[in-house]
Amino acid sequence: MTSNAVISGFEVVAAVFAALTAVRMRRSGLHNRYPFLFAYLMLQVLCSIPPATMNLASRGYFWYWMTIEPISWIIEILVVRELCGLVLERYRGLCSLGHWSMYGGVALAAAISLATLLPRIPVAMTHRSKLMFYCAAGNRGIHLALAIFLLLMMLLASRYPIPLNRNVVLNAAMFTALFFGNTLESLLLTVFDLRIAAAMDVGLTASTVVSLIVWFFALTPAGENDRMELGHFRPEDEARILHRLDQINRLVLQLPGHMYGAGA
C-alpha cells in the first residue's frame, strides 16, 4: 500500500470525526462557546475530502492546497486567540495584551522563518516549488509561534489560581501538540531531509486523526463544568496572588491610549 493510499484513508477518517464532532458541538451548544474551534473542525472536513478524492501530485490539488493553507493559518490564529480569551476572560487587559503579543510573535516568527529559508532556494527552482517552500516557511513560523504561545500561556496559568474548565485545557493541549507536529514536519522537510516527506505526511495525518477522535469523545458539555486548577495554592496565597493579578490587569488597562483595553 502506497503512502498516498494510507493518507487518503486517514483523511476519510479525519473528515468523519471532524464532521461528527462539529455536529455534537452544534447540538450541545458548544459551538457558541468555541466558534473558531467549530470553524476549524468544518475546515478539517473541507481539507480532508480532496486528498481522498484527488491526485496529490496534480496541478489542481496543488492550487487547492495553496488556497486553503492561508485560510487554515487564519482560523488557527483565531482559535488560539479564542483560547487566550477563555483563559483570561476575567482579565480584559491581560487578555488583550496576550492577543497583541500573539500577533507580534506570529508575524516575527513567520518573517524569521522565511528569511532563513530564502538562501536555501536554488535559482533554478520552478515557480511552483518556490511557492511550496514559501508556504512551508510560513507554516513553520506560524505554527511554532502559536505552539510556544499556548505553552507559555498554560505555564503562566499554572502559576496563578485561575480555574479552567476541562474543555479549555483539552483544546490547549491538542492544539499545542498539533502545532509542534506541524513545525517538526516543516523543519524536517525544508531543513534536513526531503526524502522523509511521505513518512512525515503519514505521521502528521495520523496525529490529526487521533486529535479529532479525542475531541469527539472528550469535548462535552460536562467539560464546561469540570473545573481544573493547574496549580494548587493555600487560601492565603491564592488571595494574595489574585490581588496581584488584578493589580497587573488594572495597570495594563490604564496604559496610554487604552491600547490593551479595546478588546483586541
Image: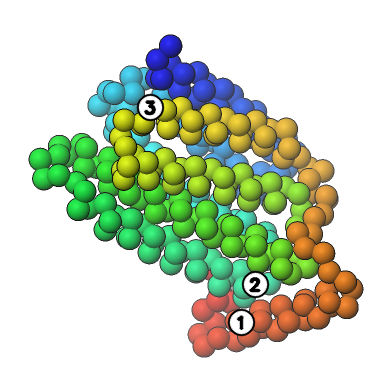
Image point (56%, 22%), residue name: 13
The three-letter code of the residue at mark 2 reads Arg
* Among the 4 quarters of the image, the one containing residue 246: bottom right
Query: Judging from the image, what secondary structure is the residue with disc 2 in?
Result: helix
Mark 2 packing: few (<14 Cα in 10 Å), some, or many (20+)?
A: many
The three-letter code of the residue at mark 3 reads Ala
> Which quarter of the rendering shows the N terminus?
top left
Q: Which residue is mark 3?
A: 198
Left or right of residue 210, residue 28 in this image:
right
Marks 1/2 in contact by CB < 8 Å: the verdict is: yes
Left or right of residue 123, residue 57 in this image:
right
Q: CA distance from mark 1 to mark 2?
A: 8 Å
Q: Is residue 107 above or below residue 140?
A: below
Residue 223, horizontal then vertical, whole percent: 78, 45
Q: Is residue 264 above or below residue 58?
A: below
How many labels, in total? 3
Q: CA distance from mark 2 to mark 3?
A: 44 Å
Q: CA distance from mark 1 to mark 3?
A: 49 Å
* Residue placed most toward the observer, 226 or 230: 230
Residue that protrudes farthest toward the front in the picture: 192
The answer to which of marks 1 and 3 sits earlier in the sequence is 3
Q: Which mark is residue 216?
A: none
* Among the 4 quarters of the image, the one containing residue 39: top right
Q: Which residue is mark 1?
A: 253
Query: Judging from the image, what secondary structure is the residue with disc 1 in?
Result: helix
The answer to which of marks 1 and 2 sits earlier in the sequence is 2
Image point (21%, 48%), residue name: 120
Q: Which mark is residue 92?
A: 2
Q: Is residue 78 visible?
A: no
Residue that protrudes farthest toward the top in the picture: 1
Residue 115, horizontal then vertical, whole percent: 26, 58
